[in-house]
Image (cartoon, rainbow, N blue to C red):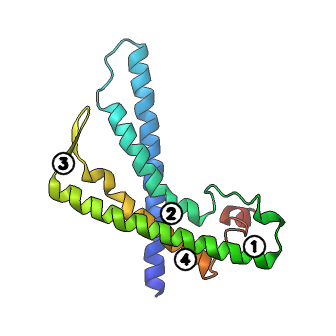
Amino acid sequence: MNVIFKAYNQVLHGMAGLAGIAIFAAFVMIVVDVLMRITGLEPFIFILTTVEYILLWFTMLAAPYLLRIKAHVFIDAVTQFMPPTIKKAIAKLVYVLCIIACCIYGYHLVILLVESIQSGELDMRSFEIPIWILFVPMPLCFFMCAIEFIRYLVGIDDMYSQSIQERDNV
């Protein structure tokens, strides 16, 4: 079982690393595009479309890791004033709802991925790319987010506890 957990953590961290590389690549492409425009050169036609794809992939690849380290958007304005027992019950309900939502999205995205592969449809903008490439990271990332919420639900971690980074800095 430890081998599975270790492999999962490596995939999680690998996806976060890829997300970092992707967003850096988008940054470089945007800088190149702006510099080319300023200098009067014709910018590369593929940059805008590529950056759009990168933003989607970056979001999907980073989501499970951000959930793990509690760097996602979390609003506790209502629950911060509740007694711990009610707070814990509401947290469990939220975890279950998030697991269900992630699994539903992941399931439908698998279907969209398979359909787009079978149809061979192309996304035609500045260059043609198979549309299924857009869907590749989505099912995996939603299912991995569901796993992270399951970790919260079974008590391995809690959204209300300190983040991993805060614990490491203490």
Q: Secondary structure at mark 1?
A: helix
Q: Secondary structure at mark 2?
A: helix
Q: Which mark is residue 87?
A: 1
Of tags 2 and 3, the one toward the viewer is: 3
Q: Residue furthest bottom?
A: 1
Q: Which mark is residue 121?
A: 3
- Name the residue rendered at 39%, 25% in the picture: 33
* Three-letter amino acid code of the residue under disc 4: Ile
Instruction: Compare marks 4 and 3 and give the one earlier in the sequence.
Output: 3
Instruction: Compare marks 2 and 4 and give the one earlier in the sequence.
Output: 2
From the image, tell me which residue sits under label 2.
64
The quadrant of the image that shows the C terminus is bottom right
- Name the residue rendered at 48%, 79% in the picture: 5
From the image, tell me which residue sits under label 4.
150
In the picture, measured across the screen, residue 94 lies left or right of residue 136, that is right
> Residue 121 placed where, x, y %?
18, 48
Q: Secondary structure at mark 3?
A: loop
- Name the residue rendered at 46%, 44% in the picture: 23
**Residues at badges 3 and 1 in contact (C-beta under 8 Å)?**
no
